[in-house]
Image (tube, helix red, strand yellow):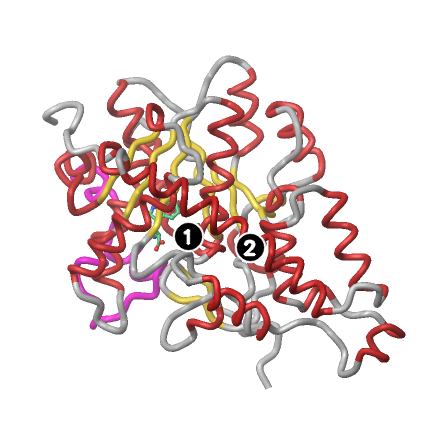
Amino acid sequence: MPGKKDFVVTPYEVKGRIDYERLREQFGTQPVTPELLSKLRHMAGGELPPALARGIYYSHRDLPALLDGYANGRPFFLYSGRGPSGPLHTSHLLQFQLCQWFQQRLGVPMYIQITDDEKFWSSKTGIAREETAHWGVENLIDILALGFDPKRTFTFFDSRSIGALYPLAIRVARKVTYSTVKAVFGFDPSTNIGLVFYTALQTVPAFWPSWAEGRAVPCLIPCGIDQDPHFRISRDIAEGLGFPKPALLHSQMVPGLLGESVMSTTGDRSDNALFLNDPPATVERKVRNAFTGGRATVEEQRRLGAVPEVCSIWALWRTQFARTEAEFVEVTEGCRSGRLLCGECKSRLLERVQAFYRSHAEAREKTKEWAESTIVTAAPKPL
Ligand code: TRP
């Protein structure tokens, strides 16, 4: 029987039931502590975003130093990205919701990378180039529609921004050996050479503003912890190239609606996630069929209460949809005590999700007009 030990997390493979604390120790990152959260709350003023307040963002590298720098007049920029292989689902938004919050609170620039090349190279099912390019634009619009400031937000759309990225990628690639990528990503002899080079491109945005401005600009990368291996490489080579090491803030992966450990959607698992282009009836069906921590009968549930920690609906409340801490506690305690039954809880969540879909669709329409204007195509200098 597979024990707790049997999990694998790399950018190209997530397998098994993940023990996040052990993963953090394996990766050698720092825990997000209550002190760090209160520092953030103090700096940004007001409530933290749900995923940060409730422990989804649980690990970091060098975040306190970056925040101290900011407090002492050294602003940073944000960097995050998305490999476009299909429509986004709600959990894909987490890292961007966090970035948007930082941008709004602190007024810092945001760099988004859309890796239509990476997804073409890494696809196990043989996705078409047209598709990764198409979803790249669609995903970008969804991301920007979360409320990013068009004047402070810049996109590297790999296939279209290569001229802006390449002068720096040349230098980065020179520092990364084949044996490193082989060990870090688990590549084998059948891996295509696009993917062998790719990690250089994912590092470039972390250094790009420093390169463009000719001074050290600190970088903060909010991302799923599965992306940490790329940025370990970035951090290893940063100083050798004269750039600051990027700081990282890592999230756990959100469990899928069918009760699996990650909201993964490969293959025919589309009921496992709420896609942003799902029509209302589909969203409703998925929520109604979602796996919960409820008991076999109403009587039993009233008596024993249910188990929020294993419930996919509770995970949605926790990560995104409970707006205040008071509401989150109310839902959690209602569930545990048997007061709030699964049917009612699902109805309440559904209302919240549908309202989000409506306002997102509206924001999306407006964003379409300017989304592509954020794409950076020119290098700041010829070399
Ligand atoms: N590799 C990421 C993916 O597959 C995309 C990505 C590029 C990214 N740059 C990033 C993710 C920076 C987080 C932070 O989705």
Q: Residue furthest bottom?
A: 1
Residue 357 position (above or below residue 203): below
- Left/right of residue 320 with respect to residue 121 in the rendered view: right
Q: Quadrant of residue 146?
A: top left
Quick one: SS at disc 2?
helix
Residue 111 lies, in percent from the top left, at 34, 34
Q: Which numbered marker is on residue 305? A: none
Prevailing SS of the magenta stretch: helix
Q: Where does the magenta region start and end?
A: 170-195
User: From the viewer's perspective, is residue 37 above or below residue 21?
Assistant: above
* Total count of labels: 2
Q: Is mark 2 within 8 Å of ligand 1?
A: no
Residue marked by disc 1: 227
Frontmost residue, 375 versus 380: 375
Q: Earlier in the sequence, mark 1 or mark 2?
A: 1
Q: Residue at x 36, y 43 (%)?
A: 364
Instruction: Give the image location of residue 373, x and y in percent.
Output: 23, 32
Image quarter of the N terminus? bottom right
- Mark 2 Cα within 10 Å, few/some/many (few <14, many 20+)? many
- In the rendered view, does 174 fall on the left or right side of 338? left
From the viewer's perspective, is 321 left or right of 339? left
How far is the residue under mark 1 from the one under mark 2?
Answer: 27 Å
Residue extending farthest to the left is: 382
| Front one among 13 and 87 | 87
| Amino acid at pointer 1 | Gln
Rendered view: 110 above or below 50: above
- Label 2: which residue? 353
| 171 sits left or right of 332 in the view | left
The structure residue drawn at horizontal position 10% and vertical position 25%, both measured from the top left corner, is 382
